Image: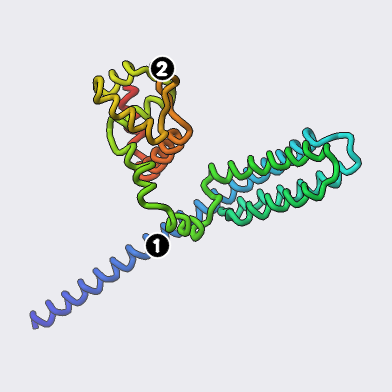
Amino acid sequence: MDDDMQSEFAAIRSALSKMHEDLRRFTERSNQQHLESILESCRGNFSNVIVGYEKNEIEQGLEKNMVKDCNMREACKSIFSELLKENIEQIREGKVSEESIRKTRSKLKELRENAQKDQCVSCFSEATRILDQQVDLMHSLNINRDKSELNEIISVLSDERMVVDMLEPLSNKQRMQIMKALSSETKTFSALSSLTGLRGGNLLFHLQKLLDYGMILQRNERGDYMITEKGYKTLRGIAETYLSLNPKEPTAEITETQK
C-alpha cells in the first residue's frame, strides 16, 4: 500500500515538475514575444519620425538649391522628389539592400545623361547630395544591408586581410591605448610614452606597426601623431561591438572614473 502511494506521489511530482517547466518556457516565450512586440513598435515609431524628417529635408533642399530660372524646374523637382522619397521609404522596412541604392543612383545617372542644359548640373548635384545623405543615414542606422546580403559579403572577405589589416594592429594593449588617445586629439611621442609607459625603441615599435597599417600618421619627421580615417573607423567599430556585447560595463567604468 505504502509503495503504491509513494509511486503515485512520485508520478504526481514528476507531472508537476513537467508542468512547471512547460509553464516556465511558455512564460519566457510570452515575455520574449511581448518584448519583441514592444521593440518592433518602437522601431516603427522611430522610423516614421526619421522618414518624415527626411521627406521634409528633400522638399526644402530641392526648393532652396535647384536653379530658379528654368522652365523645367517644377517637373525636375517632382521627379527628384518622387525618386528620393521612394528611396527613404525603405527605412520603414528596417533594411535597405545595396541593389536598391544602386538602382536609385542609376536612375539619377540616366536622367542626367538625358538632360540637355548646362545649368542642370546644379540640380542634379543637389539631388545626389540628398541621396548620399540618405545612404549615410542608412549606414549609421545599420540598415543599409539585409542579413543575406551581409552574410554573402562576410563569406567572400579575405581571412588574411582582415587579420593583418584590422585585427593584428590592435591586438595589443599599448597599441589600443595609443589609438584611444589619438581618437580625440594629436599626441607627441613623449605624451604617448607617458601614457603607455613605453620608452624609446619599445614605443617606436608599436607606433611603426600602426603607421605601417595606416591606422595613424605622423605630421612630419618629428611631429605629432594623429589617427587616420581608417584608424578611427576601425576603433569606432570595435567600440560599438564592445558596447553591444557589454552594455553595462562601460557605464560602470565611466561612473568609477567620475568618483
Amino acid type of the residue tagged 2 in the rendering? Gly
Between circles 1 and 2, the one closer to the viewer is 2
Position of 4 compared to 24: left or right?
Answer: left
Q: How is the image coloured?
A: rainbow
Residue farthest along the right direction in this orientation? 71
Residue placed furthest toward the front? 221
Percent x, y for residue 137?
A: 59, 42
Q: Dot 2, crowdedness within 10 Å: few (<14), some or many (≥20)?
A: few
Snapshot quadrant of residue 183: top left
Q: Quadrant of residue 4?
A: bottom left
Question: Which is more toward the observer, 215 or 185?
Answer: 215
Residue visible at 49% across and 60% down? Answer: 148
**Residue 98 position in % (x across, y down):** 58, 53
Q: Could you tell me which residue is drawn at 58 percent across and 46 percent down?
A: 138
Q: Quick one: quadrant of the C terminus?
A: top left
The residue under the point 35% across, 34% down is 250
Disc 1: which residue: 29
For the N terminus, give its image quadrant.
Answer: bottom left
* Residue type pointed to by label 1: Arg
Instruction: Find residue 223 and name its label.
Output: 2
Q: CA distance from mark 1 to mark 2?
A: 59 Å
